[in-house]
Amino acid sequence: MIVDRPDSHFIFVFHPSALMGKKYTLYEGKELTNGEVLQYWGKWIVLGDKSWLDELAQKLDRYVEDKVIPCIKYDRKPPANLGLKEAVMMVYCDKRKGEEIWEILHQHGVKIKAWVSERETMEMWLPGGPLLEQWITSMNLCEEDARINREDAAARLGYIFDHPDEIFSPWEQ
Amino acid sequence: MSITIIVPGALKDLLGGSDQVACEGKTIGECIADLDYKFSDFKSRVLDEKGEINSSFMIFLDGQNVRSLSGMATSVKEGDEVNIIPFAAGG
């Protein structure tokens, strides 16, 4: 089901069970640990106009309903503060299912084949990481607020790296 | 050896207004050199002063980020597709 809350930057495609607290970071029905998320979890990146991503989300919804695709999120508008001119859709899955899901995306007109692991993404958002620092600059944060955001990122993301055997818990966005 | 380079709409200016072009090369580095010959400033826009992929872009071969392969030395073969996306899209 498509979850489109106007107050969120992102539009999500979730299985209804995810809204009832069920995890979507699964492999063969088993919840992934933090360590497994760092090893296997990631997303296919799709770029395009918002209207095209809306159409694609409608087509992919049935694969999410069938639990073939675990979760999708995409931008309501291009994130200009990160220097992007197009909206980005992220089609999440376990790398071990990655090719199966890529074939679905390709059948629906996706041409760019770009896999980004969750580990890479987390490293981009750690203190000193290029995306966190770019975001802090774009938001014109004062030194104190920048420090608070860096500490928050270090705590939240660092916890995942430091506790590999715990079951992964996605955070609210 | 013909390799296909595919970019999203927002990066078409890199390829003279096309979102897909053919190039020649046995490695990513050779493909970039060939693209620089065809499209002025391609290399200076995509590479840093050390000749590595700069922090604005990610380059993928069959879905894999070439930074996690052999970077500029990553081998390509006839028929391969190489994708270039803005770095920030990966976050």
Image (tube, rainbow, N blue to C red):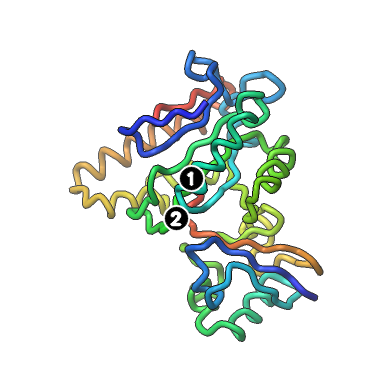
Mark 2 surroundings: few (<14), some (14-19) or many (≥20) residues within 10 A: many
Residue at numbered disc 1: A123
On the picture, is B82 further left or further right than B57?
right
Question: Callout 1: residue from which chain?
Answer: A
Mark 1 surroundings: few (<14), some (14-19) or many (≥20) residues within 10 A: some
Q: What amino acid is labelled 1 in the image?
A: Glu
Q: Residue at x 63, y 75 (%)?
A: B32
Helix, strand or loop for disc 2: loop
Q: Residue at x 49, y 59 (%)?
A: B86
Residue A7, picture quadrant: top left
* Location of the C terminus of chain A (image quadrant): top left
Q: Residue at x 72, y 35 (%)?
A: A97
Q: B83 or A117, which is in the foreground?
A: B83
Query: Closer to the N terminus: mark 1 or mark 2?
Result: 2
Percent x, y of residue B42: 53, 78
Q: A101 or B55, which is in the foreground?
A: A101
Residue at numbered disc 2: A86
Q: Is residue A35 visible?
A: no
